[in-house]
Image (spheres, grey):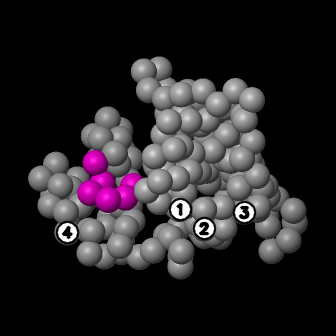
Amino acid sequence: MGGANGTLLYLLAEKNPTMRGIVFDRPNVLEGARAERDSRGLADRIELVGGTFFDAVPEADLYLLKFILHDWDEESCVKILRRCRAAMRPGARIAIVEVIVGEITDPGPGSLMDLNMLAVVSGRERSLSEYDTLLMAAGLRRISVTEARRSPQSVIEAQALCFPSETGVT
């Protein structure tokens, strides 16, 4: 899934010709996404779905949340992650792209971005342990972290703690 005008999803789709995806954002944002998608010739592989991640998200195999969670407080983040969790297919994953700050004793370069977030929105940058807490509260667990080579961003990959079919419950 991608959001806004879909640029990240379109770039991924162009590099992966068999990939299909959904740009999910508020309906009023999707016109820009439609124009960009169509100009790139991706209309046959990229669907546009309007909605809000506070209500529900489409079913998918991968949820890509780039610079989403840092905009929101903890309660809102857990709600967003729970909506993703509820829609996940068995084996699905979530990829969270954010700047991870160090623990309070080792804040690292993300601290300046954190000050910006605190001043502008209700969100903030978080440490890895803080992301783990959000994930656990939503029924998810971190399975990997990959740091970008030339960027302060990292990708936190998570999956559901379990699916009904894994516990024998239907």
Q: Are marks 2 and 1 in contact (CB under 8 Å)?
A: yes
Q: Nearer the viewer, residue 76 or 20?
A: 76
Q: Earlier in the sequence, mark 1 or mark 4?
A: 4
Q: Could you say where residue 19 lies in the image, as x and y percent from the top left?
A: 38, 47
Q: Quadrant of residue 103?
A: top right
Determine which residue is flagged by label 4.
31
Q: Nearer the viewer, mark 1 or mark 4?
A: 1
Q: From this view, report whether residue 86 is shown above or below residue 74.
A: below
The x, y position of residue 164, in whole percent, is 79, 67
Left or right, 141 with reference to 51: right
Q: Residue furthest top?
A: 149
Task: State the residue at coordinates (12%, 53%).
Answer: 39
Start and end of the magenta stretch?
Answer: 1-7
Q: Decide if residue 97 is in sight here.
A: no
* Residue 138 marker: 3
Kind of residue at badge 3: Ala
Residue on which disc 2 sits:
76
Q: Position of residue 77 (x, y in %)?
A: 61, 62
Where residue 153 appears, as percent x and y from the top left, is: 49, 33
**Are the residues flagged by discs 4 and 3 in contact, CB closer than 8 Å?**
no
User: Which comes sooner in the sequence, label 4 or label 3?
Assistant: 4
Which residue lies most toward the right here? 168
Instruction: Mark 2 or mark 4: name the one nearer the start of the chain.
Output: 4
| Circles 2 and 4 in contact, beta carbons < 8 Å | no
Task: Give how far apart the Cα atoms at labels 1 and 3 are.
Answer: 20 Å
Q: Establish if 54 lies above or below 168.
A: below
Q: Tag 2's secondary structure?
A: helix
